Amino acid sequence: MIWRAMRLPKGFKLSALVALAIPVLVALTAITTLAASSPSPSPSGSTAAALPGDPTRGAALYGQNCATCHGASLEGGIGAVLNPIDKLPGVSNPLDPTFLINIITNGRTPQPHDPKQIAMPPKGGNAALTDQDVKDLAAYIIQQNTLGAGNAPLAPGELAKRTILWVGIGIIAMVFVTFLLSQYNMRWIARRAAARRK
């Protein structure tokens, strides 16, 4: 009834429906992809239970003992990047509490293919750090990586792939919508021309 009142050409109903459906499908796909890639919130206290120490104390200790080499925001510098933590060859989980505590306690001599080739001294050069201090530092590093997991920047290759995918989908959708609208406009122009000839 509405279509007849608007005097739209036959077949426009399907064309208009398809023209509207494509942008909606693109938007829904984007929303679904973003929702799937977002980290689900962990139950309250589950992260804290897995931490080897107190991350609040660890933050203060980090500022006093580690920020000079590893950056104020764990972004790295002379020392390794700690958020997101550098991947090390032969280490499956660099956020494993035992591994972190061992590295902080004993230091690390650079290995082939390490991101940084500068040795880390035991306890960052501060022998006064206690075992509990080391656990608190490890807890702080783990917590910061856990909190930042959803905000970590994409690798350049992954970012390029996603950009190409969404730009490609957008171009195809716009070309299709433009084609449908041009078909409608040509029919409308033809009907107007026919009405003037009468």
Image (spheres, rainbow, N blue to C red):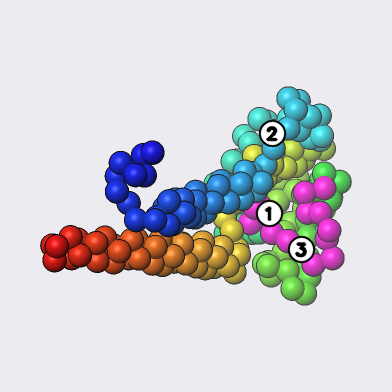
Q: What residue is rendered at 74% in x and 56% in y? A: 121
Q: Considering depth in this image, is 149 or 73 the residue closer to the camera?
A: 149
**How many numbered marks, from 0 up?**
3
Q: Is residue 9 left or right of residue 134?
A: left
User: Which residue bears the numbered disc 1?
Assistant: 85
Dot placed on the residue nearer the N-terminal end, 2 or 1:
2
**Residue 95 location (% of width, % of height):** 77, 49
User: Which residue bears the numbered disc 3?
Assistant: 88
Q: Is residue 92 magenta?
A: yes
Q: CA gap, disc 2 to disc 3? A: 27 Å
**Label drawn at residue 41:** 2
Q: CA gap, disc 3 to disc 1? A: 9 Å
**For the magenta stretch, what is the residue range?**
81-96
Q: Main secondary structure of the magenta part?
A: loop
Can the viewer see residue 163 in this picture?
no
Q: What residue is rendered at 47% in x and 67% in y? A: 172
Amino acid type at circle 3 is Leu
**Residue 182 location (% of width, % of height):** 32, 65
Amino acid type at circle 2 is Pro
Q: CA gap, disc 2 to disc 1? A: 21 Å
The N terminus sits in image quarter: top left
Q: What residue is rendered at 82% in x and 34% in y? A: 50
Q: Are marks 2 and 3 in contact (CB under 8 Å)?
A: no
Q: Is residue 11 above or below residue 41?
A: below
Most distant residue in the front direction: 198
Q: Considering depth in this image, is 194 or 14 the residue closer to the camera?
A: 194
Dot placed on the residue nearer the N-terminal end, 2 or 3:
2
**Residue 178 location (% of width, % of height):** 36, 64
Q: What residue is rendered at 18% in x and 65% in y? A: 193
The C terminus sits in image quarter: bottom left
Q: Residues within 10 Å of mark 1 (few under 14, many from 20)?
A: some
Q: Nearer the viewer, mark 2 or mark 1?
A: 2
